[in-house]
Image: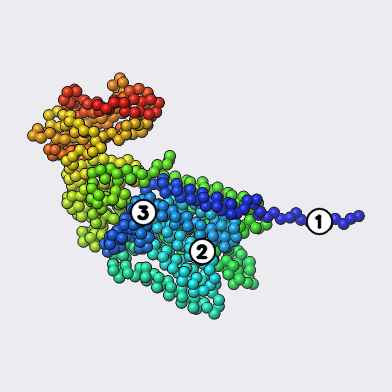
Amino acid sequence: MQDVQSSAPPRASFSPRVSPATVYWALLLLFALQLAFWVAFRLVNLDEGWYLWAGKEIYAGRRLYSDFAYTQTPLLPYVYGLVQLVFGNGLYVGRILTAVFGFGAGALSAATARRIAGPWAGVFALAFLITTFLAVTSFGYTATYGLTAFLLAAAFYLASRLPPGSRRTWLIAACLALATAGRLAVIVVFIPMAAFLIFNAPRGRRVRTVLEFVVAAAVLLGLLLGPFILASGRQMAYDIFGFHMDRTTAEWRRGVLVSTLRETVRDFTVPVVVYGAAVVDLCIRILRRRGDWQRALADHALELTLAAAVALLFLAHLVPRTATTYYNVLQAPMIAILFGALAVRLLRGSRPRLAAAILAILLVVQVVTQARAIRFYDLTAWPPVNQVEIVRTAARDLNQTVPPGGKLLTFDPHLALEAGLEMPPGYEMSIFSYRPTWTTEQAQEYRVVNNELLLRDLNNGVDAVALTQLDEDLLYGDRDALFAALYGNYNLASSVPGFDPFRHDLRIYLPPQWALPASAAALDQPFGDAIRLAGYEIDSPSVRAGETLTLALYWQARDGTPRPDDVTVFVHLLDADEAVVAGHDNPPCRGTCPVSTWQPGEVIRDEYTLQVPASLSPGDYRIEIGMYDPQTLTRLPVAGVGDRLILASYNCQATRCVVSREE
C-alpha cells in the first residue's frame, strides 16, 4: 500500500493578472482628468483672487505685508506671480498651475509608496488619493494646498530615495522650508523629519546630522522669511498670526475644536480609519519584534515619520480661529502613502482575498462619503457650470465701459484681475479686508478698510463698483451713509447671476454715463414729455425654454422738461393672445436711480431679466416695454405707438425661441 502524504492547500497569494504599471498609468490619467474637471467647474473660491492679486502686485513693485495685507507666508505670490508674468493674469492660470502642483504631489506620493512597499503600493496610494475628492478639488483652484502638498511630497520622496548624508539633509530641509514659506503650519513637520534623519544616520554621524539639519532649516527659513520680518515685522505678525487668532473667546475656541473634530470624521471618514489602521499596524509590527526594536523601527521609519507628520499637521490646523475640516486635505497625499504600504502588507498576509474585499469596500465607502462631502459643501453646480466663465463675462461687461487700467472698487479681486483693472488700496484681501469696527488708524496700518475709508473711496469716485449680494449684506454700521454714497454717485448698471461660490448675484454700479454703448441698438423714442428711450440691448438673439433673457434699456431725461417723481418700468413677454407669459415690473435700476435724480443727457442703463417658461408652447411672442405711475397705474404715452413699445418678436419652436423681427 502506497503511503499517502497529507498536505495543506497552498496559501492564496496576491497575483493579479494585470501589471501594476498598467493600472498606475490609468490612475494617473484619471487623476489628470479629475483635476481638469475641477479647474473648469469648481466654484470660484473667495481666496483665489487675493492669492493671484498678491502675485501680480509683487512683480509690480509692491511689497507683501507692508504695502498690502497677505495672511499667509510669502512663497505662493512669488511662484504664481512669476507664472502670471509669462502667461497673463487670471483664474485659469492660477488653477492650472495649482493642478500641476497637485498632480506632482500625487505622482511623488505614489513613487514614495513604491519605494516603501513595491509597485502595487504606488497603485493603491494613487487610488486612495484620487478617491479623496475633497483633496483633488483643493488641487483644482488657486490656494496654498497644491504647492505645499507638492513640496511636502518632494521632501518625503527624497527621504525615501537618497542615502543618508549632507546632500539629503539639505535637500529635505529646503523642501520643508519652502513648504513652510507657503503655509506656516508645515513647520511642525520639521520635528518628525529631524528624528527620521537622525535615526537613519550612521551612529558616528548623528550629532553632525542634527547640526546640519538645524543649520539648514535656520538658514533657509531665515532667507525665506527674514527679509519680510525685518521690513514689516509688525504687519506680517498680524497678517499671519493675529488675523487667524483674534476675535475668539475660550468658549468659542472649544466649540470650534469640537466641531472641527466632528466634521473631520464626517468628511474624511475613510482617511481617518486608514490612518488609525496604519498606525495600529505599525505598532503591532514593531512590538512583535521585541528582540530587535531598533531594526523594526528602521524598517518602518519613514512610515512612522509620515504618521507623526499627519498628526502634527492636524493639531497645527486646529490652532487658527478659522480652523475647518478642509485644511486636512494637505495630509491626504501622506495618508495615501500609508494606505499603499498597508494595503500591500494586508494582501501579502494569510488572507489576501479577505484583505482585497476590505480594501475594495474601503475605496467604495471613500467614493460615497467624498461625493457626499462635495455635495454638502456645494463645490460645483449640477449639471456643472463653469463659474470662471461667469467671472470672465462680468469682466467683459466692465471692459465695455471702464478703460484699461481703470479703478474698480470691489471685494472680488479676481474680477479686477480678469478685467485688467486696478483696485483702491486696502481691498486686496477680498471681503476679509473689511473691518468696519476698526479705527481708521488701525485700518491704514494693516492695509485694510473700515467704513470711513470705504465711504471716502465711494465719494472720491472710481470707474466702477462691483459688489455681490453677500458683500452688501455684510456692510455693517453706517449702512445708510454707505448706500447713500453708493446710490448717489453710481447707478446700478447690470447684474451677473451666480457670480460667487454662494450663487449670489454680482451688481455692477457705474458713475453717470453720457454715451450709448456701441453694443446697443440706438433709438429715439419719447416716453411722456420728459423721458426718451435712447436704445436697448438684448443679450442673445435666441433663447431656450427655461433659460433667462436679459434686456438692457437705455433711458435719458429730456432737456428742459420737468420729470415725474416716480415711475415703474414694465417688461413683458406676450403670447399671440396678448397674455403675459413672463414679466418684470421694476423702478429704474431696481429702485436705485429714481427718475428725479437723472441728469439731463445722462444715459441710464436699466437691466431686466425674464425667465422664459420651460413649458412654453410653440408660436410667436413679443417683448413689450412701457412706463407707468406706480400710484395711479396710468401709463406714460409712447409717442406714435400708444402706451407701450414692442421691442422684438420671437418665434418659438420646440425648445428654442429666435428673434424673428426687431422693432
Q: How far apart, in angstroms, are the residues tagged by discs 1 and 2?
A: 48 Å
Farthest front residue in view: 86
Q: Quadrant of residue 515?
A: top left
Tell me if label 3 and label 1 are in contact, CB under 8 Å: no
- The residue wearing badge 3 is 87
Point 16% across, 29% down: residue: 526
Bin the neighbour count of mark 2 within 10 Å (Cα to Cα): few under 14, some 14-19, many 20 and up. many
- The residue wearing badge 2 is 157
Q: In the rendered structure, which disc, 3 or 2, sits on the residue that comes first in sequence?
A: 3
Q: How is the image coloured?
A: rainbow
Bin the neighbour count of mark 1 within 10 Å (Cα to Cα): few under 14, some 14-19, many 20 and up. few
Q: Quadrant of the N terminus?
A: bottom right
Query: x, y percentage for residue 511?
Result: 19, 44
Query: x, y percentage for residue 385?
Result: 40, 42
Q: Nearer the viewer, residue 43 or 118?
A: 118
Q: Quadrant of the C terminus?
A: top left
Q: Nearer the viewer, mark 3 or mark 2?
A: 3
Amino acid at the residue labelled 1: Ser
Disc 3, SS: helix
Q: How far apart, in angstroms, are the residues tagged by discs 3 and 2?
A: 30 Å
Q: Is residue 148 visible?
A: yes
Q: Is residue 68 left or right of 268 when viewed as pictured?
A: left
Residue 165: numbered disc: none
Q: Nearer the viewer, residue 599 or 411?
A: 599
Q: Nearer the viewer, residue 450 or 653?
A: 653
Q: In the rendered structure, which disc, 1 or 2, sits on the residue that comes first in sequence?
A: 1
Tell me if label 1 and label 2 are in contact, CB under 8 Å: no
Q: Quadrant of residue 100?
A: bottom left
Residue 6: numbered disc: 1
Position of residue 548 relative to residue 204, above or below, is: above
Q: Nearer the viewer, mark 1 or mark 2?
A: 2
Query: x, y percentage for residue 217?
Result: 42, 71
